[in-house]
Image (tube, rainbow, N blue to C red):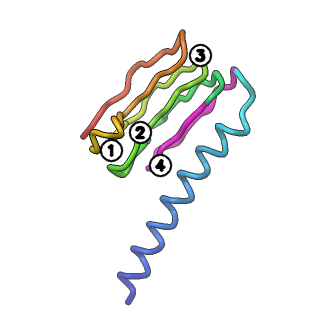
Amino acid sequence: MRGLTIVILLICCAITRAADLQAMIDAAAPGATIDVPAGVYGPIKTDKPVKLIGHDWPAIDGGGKSDCVVLVGGGSAIQGFVIRNSGDDLDQESTGLRVMGRGTTIENNRFEN
């Protein structure tokens, strides 16, 4: 039973972290820099220019079902992340990183699966 409790706790923490990162993005002012600590986060989307800076390689995980990162706002930046496990349904054309705005900077990221 103890092993099951630990697994449930880890799953809940992962879901909370994903929601926290999206909440930070949603609350940020245009042009803000968001420092993201190590951890595993779920898919994110921003429709305004923000700079996402990963520390100690945080992972953004699509869970094999969707885009991992969608940057709609022009002038956004993302650096220092592991972006992994985008969806594999060809009808959805999911991707690790979808850029839909001009002037976006993508540097020093790793892409997996």
> Which residue: 36% across, 49% down?
65
Q: Check the image and name the residue furthest to the bottom.
A: 1
Q: Which residues are magenta?
A: 31-46
The residue carrying mark 1 is 87
Left or right? Give the position of 27 relative to 65: right
As displayed, is residue 78 above or below residue 55?
above
Mark 2 vs 1, N-terminal side: 2
Identify the mark nearer the N-term, 4 or 2: 4
Tag in front: 4 or 1: 1
**Three-letter code for the amino acid on which mark 2 is drawn:** Asp
Q: Position of residue 15 (x, y in %)?
A: 51, 59
Q: Name the amino acid, label 4.
A: Gly
Q: Is residue 59 visible?
A: no
Q: Which residue is identified by label 4?
A: 42
Residue with the most extreme top position: 103
User: Dot 4, how many residues are within 10 Å of its Cα: few (below 14), some (14-19), or many (20+)?
Assistant: many
Q: Quadrant of residue 58?
A: top left
Left or right: residue 1 versus residue 73 is left
Q: Earlier in the sequence, mark 2 or mark 3?
A: 2
The quarter in which the N terminus is drawn is: bottom left
Q: Is residue 30 above or below residue 59?
A: above
